[in-house]
Image: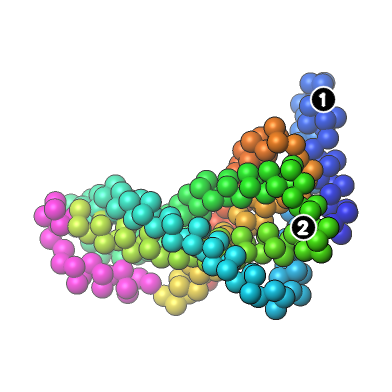
């Protein structure tokens, strides 16, 4: 399976497909792009299945080595980003939540405050903003680190030592990013809701803290908590898969790393939007 994955990626990155002559027609151009997209989807799917197989098969292998690596990735994708996310939560509360509360109070529609905050902050803006920020900060680092390791032959050195690169390099990053995005989303949502009320309080909005948080609590349902956890974990999983795939699953030169990092971030954003669209449909049908 890994050999097929390498061949597919080598074909997707071939000079003939990516740097050939200009297409004679838009049909040729669109056909080439669709073909490349299908190859990328196939490669990502195969890479995700390989990672899941290694995770399930080798979860008990080398725990003394893997557990510190997993903690390191959780720390990198979660704890170290907390200061930035506290600032983002403060800004989001002042710019979005506070103004929304003030606008609803002016038109006498504070009864819709709870459902509005749940839809805008809890369901959509909080998880998606967290995923994009972690993608930009940690996902890019994953591509650069793994791409550099692949270009310098470090991945082949691990294989020569009998160490599975997927188990050693990818599994900790996937688990760390999934748990990191889940935790940061919770902090971002809570911080935005609290700072938003502080902004509304400074504008003398006639709404007590008890009424504000009571409306939000009443608008939340157990399904919201379950789907929020599932969405954030899926964001982390797919972001890690996309970035690690582009960094590890292809033969790279050092000068190609920056180009591949840009491509990985772009595809990561697209994947996040598609995942979010799936959950929007789930919210509508449940």
Can I make out residue 89 in this image? no
Is 65 situated left or right of 137 in this image? right
What residue sits 85% from the left and 29% below the top?
16
Way the structure is coloured: rainbow
Residue occupied by mark 1: 20
- Of 110 and 42, the residue lying toward us: 42
| Helix, strand or loop status at disc 2 | helix
Q: Residues within 10 Å of mark 2 (few under 14, many from 20)?
A: some
| Helix, strand or loop status at disc 1 | loop
In reply to whether residue 205 is colored magenta, the answer given is yes
Q: Position of residue 9 (x, y in %)?
A: 81, 45
What residue sits 67% from the left and 52% below the top?
244
What residue sits 74% from the left and 50% below the top?
154
What residue sits 15% from the left and 57% below the top?
201
Q: Count how many numbered circles sit on residues in the image.
A: 2
Q: Position of residue 34 (x, y in %)?
A: 77, 40
In reply to whether residue 21 is colored magenta, the answer given is no
Q: Residues within 10 Å of mark 1 (few under 14, many from 20)?
A: few
Residue occupied by mark 2: 158
Whether 95 is drawn above or below 70: the answer is: above
Is 115 situated left or right of 256 in this image? left
The range drawn in magenta is 200-220
Which quadrant would the N terminus be assigned to in this image? bottom right
Whether 250 is drawn above or below 286: the answer is: above
Q: Are marks 1 and 2 in contact (CB under 8 Å)?
A: no
Magenta-drawn stretch, dominant element (helix, strand or loop): helix
Is 166 situated left or right of 279 in this image? right
- Mark nearest the camera among 1 and 2 is 2
Q: Position of residue 183 (x, y in %)?
A: 45, 66
Q: What number is the disc on residue 242?
A: none
């Amino acid at each position: 399976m890994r050999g097929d994955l390498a061949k597919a990626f080598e074909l997707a990155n071939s000079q003939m497909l990516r740097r050939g002559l200009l297409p004679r027609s838009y049909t040729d151009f669109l056909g080439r792009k669709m073909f490349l997209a299908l190859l990328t989807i196939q490669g990502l799917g195969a890479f995700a299945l390989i990672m899941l197989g290694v995770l399930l098969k080798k979860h008990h292998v080398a725990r003394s080595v893997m557990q510190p690596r997993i903690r390191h990735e959780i720390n990198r994708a979660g704890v170290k980003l907390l200061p930035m996310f506290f600032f983002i939560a403060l800004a989001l509360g002042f710019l979005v939540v506070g103004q929304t509360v003030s606008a609803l109070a002016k038109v006498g529609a504070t009864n819709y405050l709870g459902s509005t905050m749940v839809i805008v902050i809890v369901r959509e803006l909080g998880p998606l903003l967290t995923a994009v920020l972690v993608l930009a900060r940690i996902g890019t680092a994953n591509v650069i680190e793994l791409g550099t390791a692949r270009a310098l032959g470090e991945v082949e050195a691990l294989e020569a030592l009998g160490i599975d690169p997927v188990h050693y390099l990818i599994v900790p990053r996937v688990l760390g990013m999934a748990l990191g995005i889940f935790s940061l989303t919770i902090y971002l949502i809570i911080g935005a809701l609290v700072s938003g009320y502080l902004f509304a309080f400074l504008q003398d909005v006639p709404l007590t803290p008890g009424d504000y948080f009571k409306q939000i609590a009443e608008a939340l349902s157990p399904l919201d908590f379950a789907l929020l956890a599932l969405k954030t974990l899926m964001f982390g999983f797919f972001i890690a898969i996309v970035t690690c795939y582009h960094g590890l699953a292809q033969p790279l030169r050092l000068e190609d790393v920056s180009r591949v990092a840009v491509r990985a971030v772009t595809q990561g954003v697209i994947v996040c939007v598609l995942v979010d669209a799936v959950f929007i449909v789930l919210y509508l049908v449940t």
